[in-house]
Image (cartoon, rainbow, N blue to C red):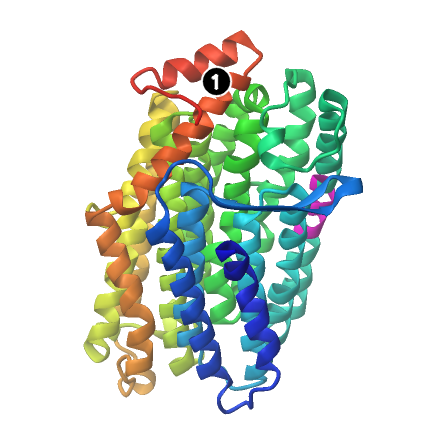
Amino acid sequence: MILSLVIFFPLLAGLLGFFIDEKNIKIYGILATCIEFFLVLFVWISFSGNGYEFIEASPLIPSLGISYFLGVDGISLVLVLMSAFMTLVGLISVNITEKIKHLVISILFLEMTMMGVFLSLDAIMFYVFWELSLIPMLYIIGVWGSGDKIYAAVKFFLYTFFGSVIMLVGIVTMAYLNFKHTGDISFNILQWQTLPLVKSIQIPLFFAFGIAFAIKTPLFPFHTWLPYAHGQAPTIGSILLAAVLLKMGTYGFVRFLLPMFPDASVFLSGMMSVIGCIMVIYASFVAFAQSDIKQVIAYSSIAHMGIIVLGVFSFSVEGISGAVFFMVSHGIVSGGLFMLVGFIYDRTHTKEMSEFGGLAKVMPIYATLFCIVMLGGIGLPLTSGFVGEFLSLLGIFKVSPWLAFFGGLGIIMGAIYSMNLYKRVFFGKLNLEKNSSLKDLNKKELCAILPIVFLVLYLGIFPNTALKHIDKATINIVGIMQQKASDESSLNFIKNLNQIRSVDAK
């Protein structure tokens, strides 16, 4: 029952939040997200790493083959823990007073949907939580955002909803194919992974699911909603959007596309890898051209998602494990950067780099912490970003050194636009009229950002804390791909990439 509690405790807390007064609602929300974090931490401590654990299964609508089916493996475990952590520190950092009760309840509801996506092993349950996540984020951007917030919120909703409709067609088709092969209608994701599908059937299904995941990630050319959403969203919206919601898309690649459609994944891997390289290079150039700090971070997120795509479609244990680790690292780093931008925006009400300069003199603690988190985004050794980027590029290097070269350009270009941002904001000419009286971070802000800084360094020094669980789950996925691949060339391709390891499905 622990996974059900993890999913539905935030919902219960959100409903009870309606009875809490505005004065105490934020403290109540922090307490609720803290309890949720410790629930997930209990799952982490109790997890042994042997396949799916804490399974909860019972018929929900037997006539339609829909069941209540939950489970957690190493991949979903690290993403659930990261989601709970970022929700907690994100809520601590909130500096909004307008309709604060509605905001806290929206965050709790959003946390419930995020947990449901990562823990559901029934496709209909997965789809319901996937769709429900749109509602609170739409509300958060549309109500507490700035500028053209309604346009940004609607664009976010329409893009992702369009992809979800296509995915629903794929889900129904998979249920039909399951009935055709077994005689039973089922939406069991683990059962779908065993269906013998020829490549000609896998390819259209790959696109049906893949387009939805590509929009959520977002992949080029479906990325245009992201800068608008980040630019107009409040800080807490940007934190959760970058840290968790984007990872739903890359999680879908790993959970659905690779084990269910291995032949199609190998056949289309060249296209996906080229898209990943385009994202890395294109987004890096655009990030360098931005004058808005938040937009620089938004486009850097697109570039980093490109590296994750390269790792996922390397089909090697190193590459996939590195991509999943990088999902966690990027969630922490990008969430931390958006949080830090929010701190300075609360003081100055601007995000333009030209309005700053010399902040290191008046806000030395802020400048130091910003530097550490930013270096994690660049991928400096001994930070979490280095581990994920290195393993992802190592995986794709085994496929093509050229793809690794173009992916690696993202690290160099990331250093260029990040250091340019840091120089202009912290070491440029100080605007004495506007910025000389700025106060450094207060206790509340330090309570929110210091745990993020700690994790950026801790996971960079001790990556095996997460990798030991991720690696076992990745070996299982690669093993399923080998067993299910019907095309001889696809099977040999996957085996050759993993010939150093003993890969057996568990």
| Residue 289 placement: quadrant | bottom left
Q: Residue at x 57, y 33 (%)?
A: 190
Can residue 236 be seen here?
A: yes
Q: Left of 270 or right of it: where is 333?
A: left
- Looking at the image, which residue sits at the far right? 63
Chief SS of the magenta region: helix
In the image, residue 504 sits, relative to residue 79, either above or below, namely above
Residue bearing the label numbered 1: 482
In the image, residue 269 sits, relative to residue 60, either above or below, namely above
Q: Residue at x 28, y 82 (%)?
A: 443
Can residue 289 be seen here?
A: no
Query: Percent from the top left, x then y, of residue 40?
Result: 42, 58
* Quadrant placement of the C terminus: top left
Look at label 1 and name its amino acid.
Gln
Q: Is residue 271 magenta?
A: no
In the image, residue 328 sits, relative to residue 28, either above or below, namely above
Boundaries of the magenta span: 160-167
Query: Percent from the top left, x then y, of residue 111?
Result: 53, 63
Q: Nearer the viewer, residue 288 or 176?
A: 176
Q: Nearer the viewer, residue 387 or 7?
A: 7
Q: Residue at x 33, y 19 (%)?
A: 502
